[in-house]
Image (spheres, helix red, strand yellow):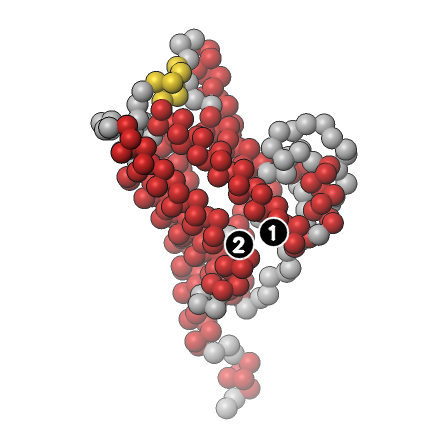
Amino acid sequence: MTDHALLSPPAKTITGGLMAMLYGTLTYVLFLGTFLYAIAFVGNLPVPKTIDSGTAGPLVPSLIINALLLGVFAIQHSVMARPAFKRWWTRIVPQSVERTTFVLFASLALLLLYWQWRPMTEIVWSATDPLAAVFLETISWIGWAVVLASTFMINHFELFGLRQVLARLLGRELPPPEFKTPMFYKAVRHPIYLGFLLAFWATPTMTVGHLVFAIATTGYILIGIWLEERDLIALFGDQYRRYRQQVSMLIPLPRHKAKVG
């Protein structure tokens, strides 16, 4: 055996790294398309299926089906994000693609929701003033921008699994989680969720279907925050407890000045 052979990584390791990178990249592209479609779906932009497009059916069956679709996403998102599930799950899938697999299942749950969503088109409110309509649409777009910008303020590519698969390909270890509060995170603890709430609720025309979607996702966000903060306290301890005391959850309100990193 030559010195070169001793120093070179096994072919199996290289192949595994390349396969993980391909898997992570394709899943990220799927996620990106799913996210962009979400903007069109909620905003009733010209795509094949939106939250209010199609022929409305009977109210009760539509409500049940939509609730089940929202429940599939909520359960998938909540269960697969928990540390206990991750510890079990990484006995089956490699650690490097755990996050990618989470993103894949979340994207598939959203695609199912887009496909099977039942419109409920009765009007709850409608902004008749053109300026009011433009204002609400602008708030919704700001919400989507806040969501996307907030992911880059922490680590967008780690959040969606690309950093992990790249590290495997390069044979590098990822550093341990670091607690930090960049930009928006100094004003609210959960700017991503705040952005979603703005995007979902700010609409010139609120239908029953859109209202059901907004109420359900708001409820899920509040439950998700409770679960997420419990995990963050377990991970960062008093550092996160101090942050929670100093920075508002969703609404940027003046509180004690945050000196949390």
Taking the spot 39% from the left edge, 14% from the top edge, the residue there is 126
1 and 2 marks in contact (CB < 8 Å): yes
Counting other residues with Cα less than 10 Å from the Cα at mark 2, is it few (<14), some (14-19), or many (20 or more)? few
Compared to residue 172, the image places residue 73 above or below, namely: above
Taking the spot 47% from the left edge, 29% from the top edge, the residue there is 199
Q: In this view, does 137 lie to the left or right of 183?
A: left
Which of these two is toward me, 115 or 61?
A: 61
* N-term mark: 1 or 2: 2
> According to the image, label 1 marks what residue?
231
Query: How many circles with numbers are drawn on the protein?
Result: 2
- Amino acid at dot 2: Arg
Q: Position of residue 90 (x, y in %)?
A: 49, 65
Compared to residue 34, the image places residue 254 above or below, namely: above
Q: Where is residue 240 in the image (x, y as percent from the top left)?
A: 70, 46
Q: Distance between the residues labelled 1 and 2?
A: 8 Å
Taking the spot 43% from the left edge, 63% from the top edge, the residue there is 20
Q: Is residue 41 visible from the viewing direction of this image?
A: yes
Which quadrant of the view contains residue 74?
Answer: top left
Counting other residues with Cα less than 10 Å from the Cα at mark 1, is it few (<14), some (14-19), or many (20 or more)? some
Quarter that holds the C terminus: top right
Q: Is residue 215 left or right of residue 226?
A: left
Q: Which mark is residue 82?
A: 2
Compared to residue 40, the image places residue 233 above or below, namely: below
Compared to residue 78, the image places residue 188 above or below, namely: above
Give the SS element for disc 2: loop
Report the residue that reaches farthest toward the front.
Answer: 60
Q: Is residue 146 left or right of residue 184?
A: left
Q: Position of residue 55 (x, y in %)?
A: 22, 27
